[in-house]
Image (cartoon, rainbow, N blue to C red):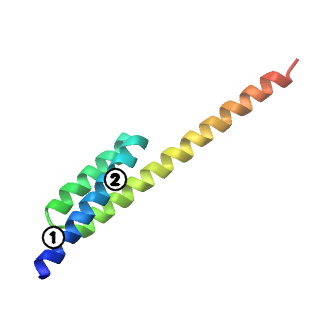
């Protein structure tokens, strides 16, 4: 019975990680690679390392989104200055 519970838990983890992989791959390649490494860690039985890799992937996405937002703000600011100048 315990083996069945562990097997179900592992399947749920893999499905969740597949969903996370799709989200991360859509955001950045580096984050997707991080999640793929997490799959490898999970397959090897090291769940703690897999969780760390997913967290690193999420942080990479956050950094990328913030960076893109800052670049867009800078672009809009430059465009606004051009329109105001005679």
Residue lying furthest bottom in this view?
1
Circle number at residue 69: none
Residue at 17% from the left image edge and 74% from the top image edge = 6
| Res 28 → quadrant | top left
Label 1 environment density (alpha carbons within 10 Å; few <14, some 14–19, many ≥20)? few
For mark 1, give the secondary structure: helix
Q: Is residue 43 left or right of residue 78?
A: left
Quarter of the N terminus within the rendering = bottom left
The disc, 2 or 1, on the residue closer to the chain's N-terminal end is 1
Q: What residue is pinned by disc 2?
A: 19
Q: Vertical placement of 8 versus 19: above or below?
A: below
x and y percentages locating residue 4 in the rendered image: 13, 75
Residue at 30% from the left image edge and 57% from the top image edge = 17
Q: Vertical placement of 11 versus 36: above or below?
A: below
| Res 72 → quadrant | top right
Q: Nearer the viewer, residue 39 or 19?
A: 19
Q: CA distance from mark 2 to mark 1?
A: 19 Å
x and y percentages locating residue 40 in the rendered image: 18, 55
Query: How many numbered marks are there?
Result: 2
Q: Vertical placement of 59 versus 1: above or below?
A: above
Q: What residue is pinned by disc 1?
A: 7
Residue at 32% from the left image edge and 50% from the top image edge = 21
For mark 2, give the secondary structure: helix
């Amino acid at each position: 019975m315990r083996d069945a519970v562990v097997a179900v838990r592992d399947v749920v983890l893999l499905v969740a990680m597949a969903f996370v992989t799709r989200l991360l791959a859509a955001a950045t390649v580096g984050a997707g690679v991080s999640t793929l490494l997490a799959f490898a860690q999970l397959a090897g039985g090291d769940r703690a390392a897999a969780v760390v890799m997913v967290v690193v992937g999420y942080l990479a996405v956050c950094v990328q989104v913030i960076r893109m937002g800052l670049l867009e703000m800078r672009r809009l600011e430059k465009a606004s200055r051009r329109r105001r100048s005679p």
